[in-house]
Image: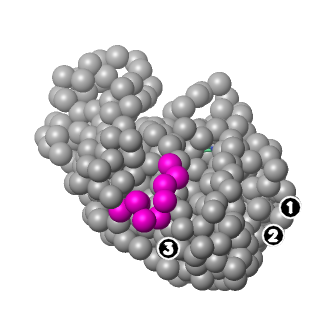
Amino acid sequence: MDNNQDLYCVGCGAKLQTTDKKKAGFLPENTLNKYLESDEQELYCQRCFRLRNYNDIMDVDMEDSEFIDILNKISDEDALVVNLIDIFDYNGSVIPGIHRFIGNNEMILVANKEDLLPKSVNRDKLKRWFHKEAQKDGLNPVDEILISAKKNTNLDDLLTMINKHRGKKDVYIVGTTNVGKSTLVNSIISMSSDIKNLVTTSRFPGTTLDRIEIPLDDGAMMIDTPGIIHRYQLAHFLNEKELKEVTPSSEIKPKVYQLRGLQTLFIAGLARIDFVDDIKTNAFVYVDNNLLIHRTKLEKADEFYEKHQGDILNPPFEPGTLPEMNPVKFTITEKSDIVIAGLGWVTVQPGITIKAYAPKGVEITLRKAIV
Ligand SMILES: Nc1nc2c(ncn2[C@@H]2O[C@H](COP(=O)(O)OP(=O)(O)OP(=O)(O)O)[C@@H](O)[C@H]2O)c(=O)[nH]1
Ligand SMILES: [Mg+2]
């Protein structure tokens, strides 16, 4: 295949090739030939085809550093950067000190997946909260907005913001894997055309593999980019079926627990919160609505976990597929959230001690309660 020099997959941005199934951009030679003979506009690689039609992910050989390089190159350009974070997984999705990658270019900070947070969470308070967090992480945006790329919430305002800041510059959509960059690009495209779902999106981290350029009205480009990989996100430890169970798809309804103390809450087989004092308290669990929350006596918790991970406590669907549970101890001095990157959080009351467990390698953090 010599004539593919300029062919790229519209779904993931990878350069198309017909020689190596394991590498990005593969498609069978006969599919390519059929396309070349047809008058179809869009060509997708085999991986995108399967993701789009069967929700089936094929691993490809890529180095994390290739994605960092793409981000880094933005510093050589005169562009506007739109940095998406996932408001449901702020810690897992923020890129601290992002300015070292994007140089002096202006950046708009966009908190996505607003639709997942309970309506009871005051939006202005939430905006103030992520503004403060972003400052702490060394982010210095020219503007900030809370959106849902999936439900089109506040997208008009975001577009106005982008147009105000970009002049005639290109616009880069950047962020960690899975924050919804490609979903946002698709939503923006569909606002001004009848093209739907042009770019491939999926719940698997690492869907987009290379730059995807979308022409804007004035000849400038909007560029979707591959996500930066944060290995400590839970998604990297789960298989397809498990990831489906864990990813919330609609507004989270917090579950409240009145606890007697010396009790444990299991969040499926993925996390465990021990209330180690003999003190009455309550806790609010913010995770996917369908995930099992199981309460036991603290003294029985180890045994229960040994016996039931992979059956009652699922996902995981098989015992022993996740790294060992790693405990972190927290002394709670104010109303706080114990956040498990990618899974959700548990809001706890002051005056108690907590031991929180997640599979080793998944980040657990404590923050002042956002609700
Ligand atoms: N609830 C909700 N889900 C969203 C939203 N935006 C994106 N998603 C979901 O998040 C997952 C990831 O979306 P993508 O658009 O593929 O994310 P990405 O940032 O392009 O990911 P990479 O290409 O892997 O870097 C998909 O399951 C989307 O449906 C949103 O506003 N709300
Ligand atoms: Mg993408």
Q: CA distance from mark 2 to mark 1?
A: 6 Å
Pick the residue in front: 343 or 87: 343
Q: Amino acid at mark 1?
A: Asp
Q: Where on the picture, by quarter, is residue 78? A: bottom right
Q: Which comes before the other along the chain, label 1 or label 3?
A: 1
Label ID, residue 124: 1
Mark 3 surroundings within 10 Å by alpha-carbon count, few (fewer than 14), some (14 through 19), many (20 or more): some
Please indicate whether residue 22 sits to the left or right of residue 349 in the image: left
Magenta part of the protein: which range? 294-302
Q: Mark 2, mark 3: which one is toward the viewer?
A: 3
Please indicate whether residue 247 sits to the left or right of residue 29 in the image: right
In x, y percent, where is residue 241?
36, 37
Answer whether labels 2 and 1 touch (C-beta < 8 Å): yes
For label 2, being within 8 Å of ligand 1 is answered no
Q: Which residue has dot 2 on it?
A: 128
Q: Amino acid at mark 2?
A: Arg
Q: Which residue has dot 3 on it?
A: 355
Where 121 falls versus 341 (above or below)?
above
Where 341 falls versus 317 (above or below)?
below
